[in-house]
Image: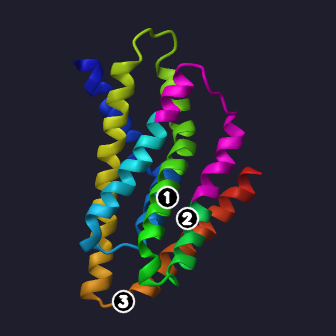
């Protein structure tokens, strides 16, 4: 059981490490369009993201999939940039289209989770070199990632509540500010990694 908790902690530390801010930035931009009252939708999005990177982790650790790290370092900020643009364009969507927009967001979170999982896999692969038991570490790592993401989302939605409900910033401006800042940071990261 010690092995399991080691990997839970490793996953939690990996996602919450400020040096690897790209995953945190993705979660920030993913949540930018939602209010705290929509916490169920946010949880489903984060879970879709976790499912995506869990699949990729499994595929990489079993040698079914291999992607060079220099490609991953460009793809991850691309996911942030695309999500930011989607947030800005999606803010113009009418209530009638909101349901299909939500389905698109779940699919994007799942798909982008596949990409972010490639980066997670590099960290996990180095620890598991030569290990025959992949299930326990993989499960523990994913639990840790999910717990870390939930903590980050709790902080993001708390800040959102503060700005939207107490300071009374308009939701549209909040979304544009967060999405615009994330897009700018993603563009810088893409340029650096190219």
Q: Residue furthest left?
A: 1
Q: Looking at the image, which is closer to me, 4 or 35?
A: 35
Question: Badge 1 is on which residue?
Answer: 26
Q: Earlier in the sequence, mark 2 or mark 3?
A: 2
Residue 113, compared with residue 183, is above or below; it is above
Q: Earlier in the sequence, mark 1 or mark 3?
A: 1
Q: Residue at x 27, y 77 (%)?
A: 161
Mark-to-mark CA distance, 1 and 2: 8 Å
Disc 3 crowd rating (10 Å Cα; few below 14, some 14-19, many 20+) is some
Determine whether label 2 and label 3 are within 8 Å by CB: no
- The reply to whether the magenta stretch includes residue 77 is yes
Disc 2 crowd rating (10 Å Cα; few below 14, some 14-19, many 20+) is many
Q: Which circle, 1 or 2, is nearer the viewer?
A: 2
Q: Find the magenta span and give its range.
A: 55-79
Q: Secondary structure at mark 1?
A: helix
Determine whether label 1 and label 2 are within 8 Å by CB: yes
Q: Secondary structure at mark 2?
A: helix
**How far from the left and from the top, in percent, is residue 151?**
29, 54
Within the image, what quadrant is residue 95 found in?
bottom left
Q: Residue at x 48, y 66 (%)?
A: 29
Q: Residue at x 34, y 66 (%)?
A: 156
Q: Residue at x 51, y 9 (%)?
A: 130
Q: Looking at the image, which is closer to me, 173 or 192?
A: 173
Determine whether label 1 and label 3 are within 8 Å by CB: no
Within the image, what quadrant is residue 159 found in?
bottom left
- The reply to whether the magenta stretch includes residue 165 is no
Question: Badge 3 is on which residue?
Answer: 169
Residue 84, compared with residue 57, is above or below; it is below
Decide whether the magenta segment is chiefly helix, strand or loop: helix
């Amino acid at each position: 059981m010690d092995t399991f908790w080691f990997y839970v902690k490793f996953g939690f530390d990996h996602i919450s490490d400020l040096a690897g801010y790209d995953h945190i930035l993705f979660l920030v931009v993913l949540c930018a369009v939602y209010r705290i009252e929509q916490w169920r939708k946010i949880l489903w999005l984060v879970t879709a993201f976790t499912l995506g990177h869990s699949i990729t982790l499994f595929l990489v650790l079993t040698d079914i999939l291999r992607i060079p790290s220099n490609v991953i370092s460009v793809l991850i900020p691309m996911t942030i940039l695309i999500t930011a643009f989607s947030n800005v364009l999606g803010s113009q969507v009418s209530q009638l289209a909101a349901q299909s927009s939500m389905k698109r967001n779940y699919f994007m979170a799942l798909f982008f989770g596949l990409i972010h999982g490639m980066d997670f896999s590099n960290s996990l692969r180095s620890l598991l070199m030569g290990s025959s038991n992949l299930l326990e570490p993989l499960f523990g790592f994913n639990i840790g990632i999910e717990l870390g993401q939930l903590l980050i989302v709790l902080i993001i939605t708390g800040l959102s509540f503060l700005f939207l409900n107490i300071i009374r910033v308009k939701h549209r401006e909040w979304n544009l500010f967060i999405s615009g800042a994330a897009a700018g940071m993603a563009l810088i990261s893409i340029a650096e990694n190219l």
